[in-house]
Amino acid sequence: MIERTTSIRRPVPFAWGFGLAALLVLALAGQSQAVSQEAFARGIPTLAPMLEEISGAVVEIATAREVPARRQFSFRGNEMPEGLRRYFENFPEFNFPEGPRSLRRGAGSGVIVDAGEGFVVTNHHVIDRAASITVRLSDGRSAEAELLGSDPHTDLALLRIDLDDLVEIAFADIETVRVGDYVVALGNPFGIGQTATSGIVSALGRAGLTNNNFEDFIQTDAAINLGNSGGALVDLEGNLVGINAAIISGSGGGNNGIGFAVPADMVQSVMEHLERDGEVRRGLLGVSISDVTPELAEALALEIDSGAMVMAVSPGSGAEAAGIEVSDVIIELDGENIGNSRELRNKVGLTLQGEEVEIALLRDGRRIELDAVIGAAAGGAVAGDSRAPRNPGFRGALLRDADSNLFGVPGVEVTDVREGGRAWSAGLRAGDLIVAVNRQAVESLAGFNQAIEETGDLVGITVLREGREMLLLVQ
């Protein structure tokens, strides 16, 4: 959308795409159905036939939202500087008129994904707080759009327009998309009209770019500029790979060739929620999770180096009812591989509440398959993310043998933890009972100290806290 100007933008410029030689290689290899045979016969590879077929599905979105006009304050008949207003608000003899409200207009892009229903997908930030939304087609027609719903956490919104003879773009199979695939970005940069730019898929599964919790971006170097927000990223067959959403621009507006699109499978999942409920009612499994890294796998003697390790299980949750335990490693959800905690969080968060899912996990080297019912996520949180603390060691904590404790099991009792110290950063709290180091039981302080000496840089500490078992990572 044209309004936004931040270092991580939604969206701004990108590097330009592949050259004539690369297209010629693709044409010779017969990898693109969009290359015109007639043009190729003349030695001129082109994407024109593909673009002509789908360009009608990419639309311009014009928005208007009300904003307060700049207030004019009077000071005994003269204009008062705005910054002084707060000092005089309690004096009735001074006049502070509210002033009129004005309209701020913005422009972005959208993609028709269902011609029959008139569904248009765009970014949440394109239509956020808009008083009116107008969709303009490439054939000159326009229509006021109905906002069916939006989701700020994935930056997606679903609109509906009432027009006949619409063109739609089909969704690509995201499982077949690979780094290095050629892609084309379509949108309305700077409000100048529909524009196509080309590039490749630079990376998959990008996350951590914004404060949102649900990210799985496709990175591309196809040029994406202000106003391209909500536009289409398509493959060479014209299938929708993703919805353009953001870029990184170190120059504050320059094209650095680093842009991001929400992948097609996430778009489809969010659409289902927005069409039905007008919002994404996120699911909750009821686990706190962490990535399984090679270092963690070595420390805990795991047989795999990927997946989502369960650090804690919430009481009364679907995970507890299903029999999921601390230290389990979740590797599949409904038959789809889980490579890390982000993938599990995204998939669970977009699963319908009340739906039963099949979970495959590893426990002590054994594969176990369980069924769990997805619950409701309060406040939009799907699962906690227990990351390895940065401060190693147990200095700042007082430990003692637990001859007698509320849990009735042997272990090492934590009697005091200095807030802000290393033990605090490691996640230990007074009252915790340490029962295992790297999944090996410890029954005394001497056994604990010996176990710590035999570990590497990363240590998994199992504790009992308020009747719950938790795994803390110390490195």
Image (tube, grey):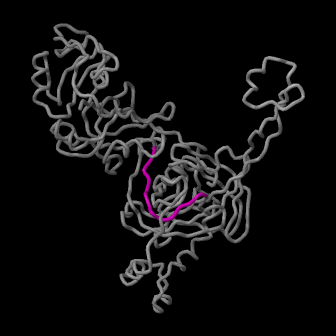
Q: Residue furthest top?
A: 404
Rendered location of residue 119, percent (x, y): 62, 58
Q: Is residue 116 left or right of residue 373?
A: right
Quarter of image, res 67: top right
In magenta segment, residue 358: no
Q: On screen, 170 above or below 76?
A: below
Rendered location of residue 471, percent (x, y): 26, 28
Q: Residue at x 9, y 23 (%)?
A: 450
Rendered location of residue 248, percent (x, y): 48, 53
Q: Residue at x 74, y 21 (%)?
A: 87
Q: Residue furthest right?
A: 77
Q: Is residue 292 left or right of residue 142?
A: left
Q: Residue at x 24, y 30 (%)?
A: 474
Q: On screen, 471 above or below 342?
A: above
Q: Residue furthest bottom?
A: 42
Tell me how many marks there are: 0
Which of the image's four quarters has the N terminus?
bottom right
Quarter of image, res 229: bottom right
Q: Nearer the viewer, residue 392 or 284?
A: 392
Which of the image's four quarters has the C terminus?
top left
Q: Nearer the viewer, residue 333 or 264?
A: 264
Q: Is residue 169 left or right of residue 72?
A: left
Q: On screen, 123 above or below 416?
A: below
Q: Nearer the viewer, residue 283 or 182?
A: 182
Residue range in magenta is 214-226
Q: Residue at x 58, y 52 (%)?
A: 123
Rendered location of residue 50, percent (x, y): 53, 76
| Secondary structure mostly seen in the magenta stretch | loop
